[in-house]
Amino acid sequence: MTSKFEQSEGFRIIQQWLHEKDRSPFSFQKETWHRFSNGYSGMVIAPTGFGKTFSVFVAVLIDFFNHPKRYKTGLKLLWITPLRSLAKDLAKAMQEAVDEIGLDWIVEVRNGDTDAKQKQRQSKAMPDILLVTPESLHLLMAQKDNQRFFNNVRCIAVDEWHELLSTKRGVMVELALAVLKYRNPQIRVWGITATIGNLDEALEVLIPNPKKRTKVVAKEQKKIDILSVYPPEVEILPWAGHLGGKLVQEVIPVILKSKSTLVFTNTRSQAEMWYQLLLDAYPDFAGQIALHHSSIDAHLRQWVEDNLTSGALKAVVSTSSLDLGVDFKPVDTVIQIGSSKGVARFMQRAGRSGHSPFETSTIYFVPTHSLELIEVSALKEAVKNKVIEKREPFILAYDVLVQFLVTLALGGGFYADELFPVIKGTYAFSELKEEEWKWCIYFITQGGKTGKNYEEFHKVVREEDGKLVVEKRKIAMLHRMNIGVIVSDSMLRVKFLSGGYIGMIEEYFISKLHKGDKFVLAGRILEYVMLKEMTVYVRLSSGKAITPSWLGGRLPLSSNLSFFLRKKLAESLSPNSREKELKFLHPLLVNQNENSHIPKENEFLVEQIKTREGYHLFFYPFEGRLVHEVMAALLAYRISKLYPISFSMAMNDYGFELFSDKEIKLSEEELHHILSKENLMQDVISSVNSTEMARRKFRDIAVISGMVIQTMPGRQVNNKSLQSSSGIIFSVLEDYDPENLLLRQAYTEVFNQQLEEVRLVAAFERIHQSKIIYIHSDRFTPLSFPIKVDSLRQSLSSEDLASRIHKMQEANLKKKNRKK
C-alpha cells in the first residue's frame, strides 16, 4: 500500500524521471524526501557514492512540485560546500537533473573563482539554486540590502558537514544559519555528512533547535577492499620515506590494470615527488598522468578534474584537494601512499573509487616504511568495527564572532539586544555570557580597552536609534577583502619571467633559496630567478631539483587509529594471528622482541640505548606526533629537575627520543616519577613556552578579528609583517588588557589544539595504569631506528643521510653478530 506522500504529484514526477534513467531511489533518499515534505530539518548520513546530494536536492524539487505556490521567484535552495571544485561539479549535476525533469530552474555557483560580471548579475537576480562556500555566503551577507537575496529561500543545505564541523569555517556557517533562520523562519536546514564518531553532536551543532529535527542514516554500507603493497623484503631497521620510492615498480602495474587511478599522498611535496617517480619509472605515462594539489594554478586544477571525469587521464597524484565528494566515475582504484593517519580520512579516500553504490571501493596501501604495515592491519580492524573519529566542534571563537558582527553592520546593520539571543542560540556560542557579548560590541565600536585611542579600530558606529552600522567606505572595503580569511604562512605566486602563472609556494621555502636554485612545482623543474613583491619569477629548467616542503604538511595520528595500532602490535607475535601484514613483518617483530620488547596493551615501553653518538631515551606512547612533541618537552623538563642535563628531541607518530651526550642516569623509581600524571598541566606549562605559542596563535586571531589587515588593495601583507604587527598587539594586551577575550582565546586554542590537553591527560592516565617496561640496550631497535633517522633528517642532506643510515645499520649488524 503506497503512502499519501508516494501518491503526491512531486514524488510521481521524480519516480518517472528515475524510471527513464533506469534507476530507483535508496530507502534513505525516500525517507529524506518524505521527512522534508513533512517540514523537518535534518541531517543525512550515508557512504560516499550513494547519492547523499540527491537526497536533499530532490527533496526540494518534490516539495516545489507539491506546493508550487510556496515557492516565490528568486533563490530557493542555498547550497553551502567547503570546496570550490566540489561546487562546480555539483552545480553541473543539478542543472542536468533539473533540465531532464523539465523544470526551468537555473543552478549557479558563487565563490572566489566566479566572474565579476556573473556576480553582478546574481546580485540583481538570483538563480533558483546557488552553491557557495562559507566565505562567499558571508560576503553576500555583507552587501547592503542583502535580505532580498534570502527572502524566498526554502532550504539551506550544508554539504560535507563533517569537514566543516571542527573548524572556524564551521562556526561561520553556524552564525550565518542562525541569522538567516531568524530573519526567515520558513528556512529548513539539512546537513549532508559521511559517518563520524559523534553524529548526534554534529546534528546538534548544525540545528540547535530540536523542534522538527531528524536524522536519516543509510542502511546501505559501502564495501571496501584494502590491499597492501609489499616490498620485496622486510626491513629489520625501517626508516620513514625511502621505501615508498622503492615501491614505485609495484605501483605501476596497479595503475596499468585499472581504468583510472587516484594516487593520494598526505603532503604536497610527497605528491610532487611521486609524480616525478612515476614518470621516471614509466616514461609512457607522459600525457596520461597529472598532478593535483591546492598550490597549483586553478585553471590547471580544473583541467585535471575535467579530464579525470571524462576518463582521459590514467592516473592523478593528489593530496586531500580531491578527498571530498567530487564524483569521478571512471576512477576504479585508489592508492594511498603512506599512512592516512586516520580511519575517516582513509574511508573517505577509499570511497573515491568504485563510485557506484554497487561497486567495491578498492584501495591499495603503499607503506613508506615497514612499520606502516601494522597501521594497515589496524585500519582493517577499525573499519570492520566501524570505529570512526569524532570531529570536535569549535566553541567560543570570538575572532569569528567579531568579524561576523562587522559583516552584519556592513550589510544593513543590527541591534545588539535583538541579536544577542540569536547568537547565543548557536552551539558555538551557547556559553556566551552577557558581559562577553558587551565586550564584543565594545570591541567593534571602540577597539576594546587598548584600541579606543586609534580611529581605525572604531569600525562600527551606533546610530541614534541604537542600530550598529559601518559608515566609512575604507573600513567597508577592507572588511570585504578580508572576510573569511584563512590564515596560513604567506603564499607567493610563482610565474615564468615570460608570463604564465604556475601556482603558489610558501614564503618560508622561497626564503631559503638563492638565485639559480632549482625546485619542483606542478611537476615542472623551475629555476629561481628573483622575488619581486609577492611574486616568485622563474624559468623552466632541467636536472636535479629540490621538492618544496609545505609547512604543517604532516598529519598527526588520530586517537582511534593509535588505539588499534597498540592493539595490533600487542597481538603481533600471537601464533593465532592470521593477518598477512603481521606475517610479512614477522622477522622485524621477532628482532624487536629479542633485542627489546613488544609492549602488550597494558604495558608501556621505554628503551635506554647507548651508542657511539651518546645516550638515547626512547618512549612509545603511540599517540601521534603532536602529543609526542609536548610529552618530550615535559619529560625533558622533569628529568632536568632531578639533575642538570639538556636534551635534543625527535619524534614520530609511534614515539619520541630524548638524546644527550651526557649519561642519562635514570632509575626505575625516577622513571615512574617522570611518567607520573601528578601536576601534569602545571609541568606542561613550565616545560613549553606557552606564551610564545599563544603569541604565534594570536596572529591568526588578530587577522580574523580584523586587528591586523592581511589583504590590502593590490597587495597582500607578508607573513613576517603579520607576525610582527600581531606580536606587538599581543604584548600590549598582555601588559594592559589581560582580560581581552581574543588574548584569552589564543591561550585556549594552544591548550586545545597544539597541546591537545584532553588527549595528553588520557595518555598519562593510560601510562599510570600500565606496567612500565624499562629496557637497556647497546643498539637501535626496529621501533627506535625510524625516530633516530627523523632526528638526523633535520641536519643532513639526503645523500649524507643515506650514507649515515647505512653506517648505523652496519654497526647494528656487527653488534648483533658479536653477541651471537
Image: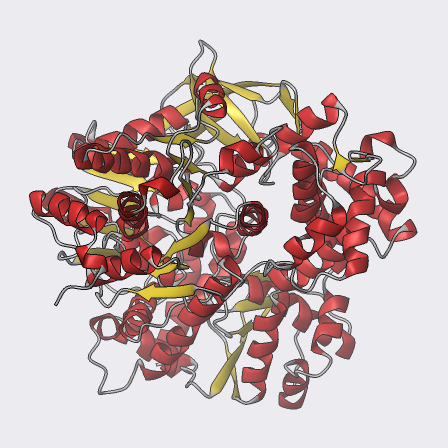
Query: In the rendered image of this protein, does residue 132 appear above or below residue 223?
Result: above
Viewer-closest of 89 and 622: 89
The residue located at (13%, 47%) in the rendering is 18
Location of the N terminus by quadrant is: bottom left
Residue 503 in the figure: left or right of residue 419: left
> Based on the displayed image, in which of its 4 quarters is residue 131 positioned?
top left
Viewer-closest of 332 and 551: 332
- Tally the marks: 0
Q: Position of residue 357 (x, y in %)?
A: 17, 56
Residue 475 in the figure: left or right of residue 508: right
Q: Is residue 597 something one can see in this rendering?
A: yes
Location of the C terminus by quadrant is: bottom left
The residue located at (46%, 38%) in the rendering is 152
Query: In the rendered image of this protein, does residue 420 appear above or below residue 539?
Result: below
The residue located at (22%, 56%) in the rendering is 364
Q: Position of residue 31 (x, y in %)?
A: 27, 62
Q: Position of residue 648 (x, y in %)?
A: 64, 61
The residue lying furthest to the front in this view is: 69
Q: Position of residue 352 (x, y in %)?
A: 26, 50
Viewer-closest of 8 and 17: 8
Instruction: Give the colour scheme shown.
Output: secondary structure
Residue 223 in the figure: left or right of residue 341: left
Query: In the rendered image of this protein, does residue 189 appear above or below residue 293?
Result: below
Q: Is residue 271 something one can see in this rendering?
A: no
